[in-house]
Amino acid sequence: MILDGSALSKTLREEVAEATRGSGVKPGLATILVGDDPASFSYVGSKQRACERAGFKAEDVRLPGQTTQAELEDVIQGLNARDDIHGVLVQQPLPKQIDTEVIVASVDPDKDVDGFHPVNLGRLMRGDRGFLPCTPFGITRLLSSAGISVSGKNVVIVGRSLLVGKPLALMFLAKMGQGGGLQDTGDATVTVCHSRTCDLPAVTLGADILVCAIGIPEFVRADMVREGATVVDVGINRVDDSTKPRGYRLVGDVMYDEVAEKAGAITPVPGGVGPMTVTMLLYNTLQSARKLYSQDPL
Ligand code: NDP
């Protein structure tokens, strides 16, 4: 089974647009881009377009690469104070003169639709309601919509970043439907691996569900995957390809063709986890406009 994030995103974005029309409030998302990193440019552009299609107000804040910490904090404080802005997203990476941790913490936690603020990560850790980080949130939706339950399963996550691996581990570990837990995920037995894990294949072969968020092109091979396992590939890596007009192609962290032969279900790259990340950003922004959190139904 191919876990098609593009198709599911289309459906969910229609649901978000529908709920927006019925909500009586126009959700507003401000994206802040500092500098001119081409990849960030394209990510922000796709978030802006997705907002507009869903009927949101999309505010596109572009700042020069030499912006100071104080200037950026001022912009964020201004957006925090505005009633028509319900989500504030600071696109990363930030230029080196900026302290990213301080900037992430300066966003109002109740407008932190990215789910990266320490308050929201703390809520997730404690099992309180809050904003869930979009990529892990999207992964849980992709699995549940395909009827794949993590409850009681051995889930192995390779990668322990604050963006993906750690919050996803907490979401899979949460008591399903209780406190800050989601209705459709949780109660898994979770193992988190990283670059210091000994004998990684021995661990990944024990996975009913294997999530790869490593950042190394096609790192996970078929001999690391159990027959019939579900494989979620979070990686988005550019590899040179002179046959493509752009000179590169996108691949995941999983060697797709050989792993797909063995897996029971797998996400493609592109078209798997990537579109779900933007979709859950829309979802969180709508919930913020309605004074709700990620765990609340639309
Ligand atoms: P990070 O670089 O922050 O984290 C990578 C993790 O992989 C680290 O925990 C690292 O271990 C681990 N790792 C690195 N090498 C190995 C190895 N040889 N064996 C086992 N573990 C290893 O990356 P991110 O989590 O930010 O992103 C991971 C990938 O996901 C990237 O390709 C990124 O582009 C993509 N991504 C995709 C998103 C989407 O929307 N689809 C969103 C976010 C990211 P250690 O901690 O020990 O260094």
Image (spheres, grey):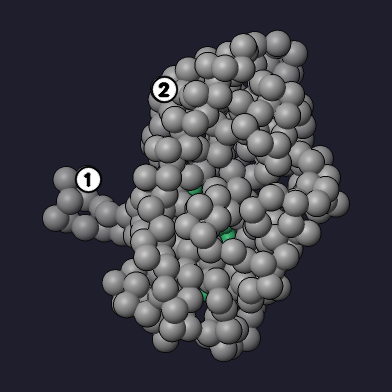
Question: Which residue is found at the position 37% from the left and 80% from the top?
Answer: 262
- Mark 2 sits on what residue? 53
- Which element is circle 2 on? helix
Q: Eyeballing the image, is 87 above or below 114? A: above
Residue 212 screen position, x and y as percent:
51, 66
Q: Tell which residue pokes out farthest to the left in this image.
A: 243
Q: In which quadrant will I find the N terminus? A: bottom left
**Who is closer to the viewer here, 180 or 98?**
180
Please identify the quarter of the rendering in which residue 89 is found. Answer: top right
Against 103, residue 1 (above or below) is below
Q: Position of residue 70 (x, y in %)?
A: 72, 23
Q: Inspect the image, locate mark 1, and give the three-letter code of the amino acid beneath it.
A: Arg
Q: Kindly identify the residue that appears in the image at 70 percent across and 11 percent down.
A: 82
Q: Which mark is residue 35?
A: none
Q: Is residue 186 left or right of residue 241?
A: right
Q: Position of residue 54 (x, y in %)?
A: 46, 23
Density class for disc 1 (Cα within 10 Å; few <14, some 14-19, many ≥20) is few
Q: Quadrant of ligand 1?
A: bottom right
Determine the residue positioned at 69% across, 50% down: 183
Judged from this view, the residue extending furthest toward the right is: 126
